[in-house]
Image (spheres, grey):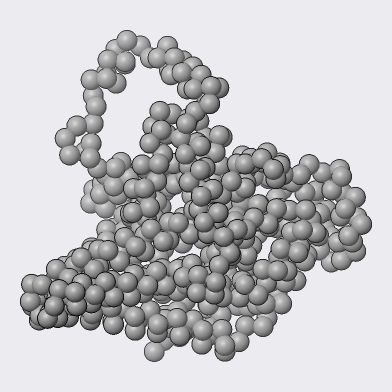
Amino acid sequence: MRLLPPISPVHSAVPIFTKPATASAKATTDKDAVSQERIETSEPAKSLPYPTLTQAPLSKTQSDALAVELNELYNEVMESLNANDARYIQRVYKLVAASEITARSLLAVAARLPKKRYKAGGWLLGTTLLSFSKIVNNMELGHNVMHGQYDWMQHPHLNSQKFDWDIVCPAPLWQHSHNYLHHTFTNILGRDHDVGYHLIRVTDEQPWTPEDRSNPLKTMILALGFEWAVAFHDIQISVDEYADAADKHELLQQKARALWAKIARQVGKDYIALPATAGLLLGRGSAISTLTGNFTANIARNLWTWAIIFCGHFTDQAHIYTHIDDQESKGDWYVRQILGSSNIKGSTLFHFLTGNLSHQIEHHTFPDMPAHRYASIAPQVEAICQKYDLSYNTGNFGRQFTQVLKRIYHFSQPNADEQQAYEQTLANENKRLEPTQKQQRISEPVTGLKRHIPQVVRQSLYYAFARANKA
């Protein structure tokens, strides 16, 4: 069995920043100095919902001092990783495998049970257990392993280069849109494409259009099919990102083909191969039980992961940034991660089922730290936030989820200024268009099957199967 090549000592998966000038001088973290600078520095408006920041809330001296403390905490944990952490993720992997095998067996035999209530009970138990397995595979196992949190183990498949999860999105596409873009440019409008997922308006910095009135409906569709939105997300981003690249077609073709190959494997497994196998061995009833159980479990996993992700990013105190500082230091980056994230309080089981993304602040601060360690450092992170007067947004699931729903509804409706701005933009656009252009725009709508297929899906199909034009 081939092992990975030696991996360098673990380090935080964040972009390279200029070194803080005060990194070696702990004196700059003196409490009196920090308190004095608070008076001279603009602070985030904590009492107002949906805050937007146009500049860093801390001075460079403060953010550099913050970085020193957070770096020390990070290094302390990473240097303490040992066999117990390795055994933990291996047990999680075994739990996912065992629960999936048990669940699929229950679904297959449920239809063979003698009474209807036994059949229903067997199906419900199997579906619940399969939902559990898929949730843990997605959250505590897949998300965290693919973040590189266990690369230090040099395990043959529990590493960010080899592991792939049980959803339709290929690991490399997710790692580009999530690990790189989202975690580097967190909550920066126009740079972090997870801000609304190109579908939902979540800040007043996004211009309002009449389509935003359907935000609640679009959110429901997004939640039900969340794995599909995640799968096509990187294609949508890459079409723009590589717009001027000479090898655009080749890059997008590679991504699109990987996506459709993964879709074929997942759909084939859950909706064709496994039901067909159950049907051949145990009869038609087992095929139907397996098919419906797989479908329900995938929906349950989608709803759960959507809820946890949105509660971690779109509560009423999740800050949005309008731009990134060209001189952003690691301390500034830490501040942006903290203010752009929200935690969820809960039991040990709840945290496990969220992949410990209920500690979203800690995750965004230390994305490659094993997530099961977040609970132990949360009090220290919160204390550091209090010291620098940074909001540490946390609350129970009901509170955070309610805030998310309110935010989505709030930005679906325009205020008077937003309505006027939209009408003015529309009027200006009409003035710029010649009469023939107006007529052309009206007379050439998308028709036929295309009107029912999202643009990003059409784009992925085009790049997957079209040949590049030869110069």
Q: Position of residue 20 (x, y in %)?
A: 78, 58
Specify whether 430 is left or right of 30.
left
Q: Is residue 123 left or right of residue 133?
A: left
| Place of residue 19 in the rendered image (x, y in percent of width and height, measured from the top left) | 75, 59
Residue 383 lies in what quarter of the image? bottom right
Q: Quadrant of the N terminus?
A: bottom left
Q: Is residue 406 above or below residue 349?
A: above
Does residue 352 appear left or right of residue 324 in this picture? left
State the image coordinates of residue 269 (x, y, percent, origin top left).
22, 70
Q: Nearer the viewer, residue 21 or 145?
A: 145
Q: Is residue 121 visible?
A: yes
In front of the other: 407 or 355:
407
Rendering quarter of residue 102: bottom left
Tell me if residue 231 can be seen: no
Residue at image x 20%, y 72%? 120
How far across and down, in percent of the image, does residue 382 sit?
A: 71, 63
Residue at 57% x, 89% y is: 83
In which quadrant will I find the C terminus? top left
Residue at screen point 71% across, 77% down: 76
Residue at (27, 58) in percent of width and height: 260
Badge count: 0
Q: Is residue 7 above or below residue 342?
A: below
